[in-house]
Structure formats: C-alpha cells, structure tokens
Image (tube, rainbow, N blue to C red):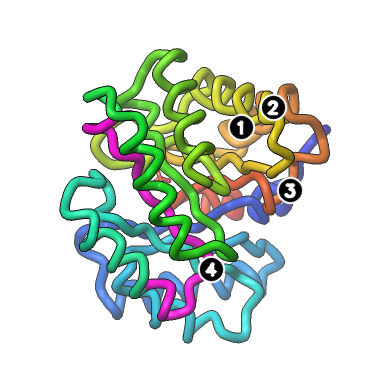
C-alpha cells in the first residue's frame, strides 16, 4: 500500500522532549500542532514532559489530538519507584491520555525479569483505561535476542504499546529492531492488541515508508492504524509538509 504524507502524519506523536522546553516554547509547539491540524496534516498526539500535562490538556481541549507525556524519570527510568509512579499519577490527574515510560534496563541487565514486569504492572495499574507505552531502548539492547526479551516482558507487564527509543542516550529506531518487535506482537495469543511505536531518528517520508513496509509485512493491513501504530518524531511532520 502507498501512504500519503497526510496519512503518515496521522500516525505521528509530535514530540518535544528538550531540556530547554518551557511554558512559552511548549505553547508555541502546541500552536504548531493545532496549525498542522488546520492545514489538514493532523497528528495523532503530542508527546511532552509530564510537567506540561495541564498546559497541553488545556491548549488541546477543543482538538482531537491526544496528549501523551513521558513519565518515570524519562529518559533513564532510574530513581525511586514511588517517585516515578507519582510523576505518572500527577500527569494522569492533569488529564493526559497516554504515558510513555522506559523499561528498567538496569533490572533487565541484572536478570531481574520479574522486577521489570512488576514495575510496568505498577504503572499500568494506575491507568487501566489509558494507554501505556513502554520504551525498550532498542539502540542500547542492540541484539534481536535482547529486543525480543524486552518486548515480551513489556507485554507481560501490560504495555499497550512497545516503543523503540527515547531518542536521547542511545541510537534511535532501526528497521531490524522494529522487525523483531513486530514479530513478537504477531506471536501474541492473549487476544489483547499490543501497539508499536517507532521513535528516534524518523525524519523523512522515505524513513516512514520503510518502517511501514516492515510493520505491514509482519502485522498486516488491519494493524496499520494510529490506534496500534505510532511514530514518535520531533521534525517529521514539518519535513513532510515542506517536502
Ligand atoms: O519519541 C520521541 C523521540 O525522541 C523523537 O525522536 P526525534 O527527535 O528523533 O524525532
């Protein structure tokens, strides 16, 4: 299937996750997101730091755009679990629709797989009816075996989406990583539909088309909807509009 640029935009979590983000810069960012919608290039969601939850929910209150925030000490998932969970709770109280967390890589590497799963279950327990995306950090995991394990643990923990990357400390998404993640999703027998979010370094129409081809190959056309597939990107939409 060929995908138009407008269609690609509808899968995007338009992202601003910069250390220098401010109320003013995020207001401008949200205005851009609304402008894209007006120009018939609507995105699926915005993705921000959790301290901007209330601002985003308010600014987008008359829009169909969803509000996603990162939580749990993004981008490294270190810290006290109680603090990480509290950050998620505050964002949910502010009315966000979706939360993106990072899988606990330290506990994964320590072989504490039950800990990894239980931590994700704790986040999902805060938001049974909202969307939890779990970032695997595939650029750190590197091998298909480790990406497969992380995908399986995240799904066991209740992830609604598995997401490739923070786009921060390690290389972002890769076709190889997305292929492994799509295969794991395809193998799920639980009946729960698990989504896939591709993030980190997706800049051009061609980038997006390559990822969509891999996903559709393993998960089929019914999977190709923003309810199950997202692209986390900070520059892709503007590039698509300007290409
Ligand atoms: O989802 C979040 C990603 O960090 C966005 O990555 P990007 O800045 O490479 O588009």
Q: On the image, numbered disc 3 is attached to which residue?
A: 225
Task: Measuring from the top left, give residue 218's x and y in whole percent.
Answer: 72, 23
Q: Nearer the viewer, mark 4 or mark 3?
A: 4
Q: On the image, numbered disc 4 is attached to which residue?
A: 97
C-beta proximity under 8 Å, tags 4 and 1: no
Q: On the image, numbered disc 2 is attached to which residue?
A: 186
Q: Mark 1 to mark 3: distance in Å? A: 18 Å
Earlier sequence position, callout 2 versus callout 3: 2
Determine whether the residue tagged by mark 4 lies in a helix, strand or loop: loop
Q: Which residues are magenta?
A: 91-107
Earlier sequence position, callout 4 versus callout 1: 4
Q: Nearer the viewer, mark 1 or mark 3?
A: 3
Q: Mark 4 to mark 3: distance in Å? A: 17 Å
On screen, residue 183 versus residue 4, left or right, reads left
Q: Nearer the viewer, mark 4 or mark 1?
A: 4
Earlier sequence position, callout 4 versus callout 3: 4
């Amino acid at each position: 299937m060929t995908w138009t640029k407008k269609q690609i935009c509808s899968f995007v979590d338009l992202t601003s996750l910069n250390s220098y983000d401010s109320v003013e810069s995020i207001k401008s960012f949200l205005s851009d997101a609304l402008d894209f919608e007006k120009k018939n290039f609507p995105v699926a969601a915005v993705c921000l730091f959790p301290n901007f939850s209330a601002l985003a929910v308010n600014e987008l209150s008359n829009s169909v755009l969803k509000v996603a925030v990162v939580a749990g000490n993004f981008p490294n998932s270190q810290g006290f679990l109680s603090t990480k969970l509290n950050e998620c709770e505050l964002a949910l109280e502010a009315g966000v629709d979706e939360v993106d967390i990072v899988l606990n890589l330290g506990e994964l590497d320590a072989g504490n797989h039950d800990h990894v799963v239980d931590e994700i279950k704790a986040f999902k327990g805060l938001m049974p009816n909202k969307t939890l995306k779990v970032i695997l950090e595939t650029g750190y995991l590197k091998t298909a075996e480790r990406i497969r394990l992380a995908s399986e643990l995240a799904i066991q923990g209740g992830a609604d989406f598995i997401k490739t990357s923070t786009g921060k400390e390690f290389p972002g998404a890769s076709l190889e990583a997305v292929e492994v993640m799509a295969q794991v999703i395809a193998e799920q027998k639980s009946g729960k539909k698990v989504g896939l979010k591709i993030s980190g370094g997706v800049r051009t129409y061609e980038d997006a088309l390559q990822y969509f081809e891999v996903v559709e190959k393993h998960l089929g056309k019914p999977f190709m909807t923003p309810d199950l597939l997202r692209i986390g990107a900070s520059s892709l939409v503007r590039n698509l509009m300007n290409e």
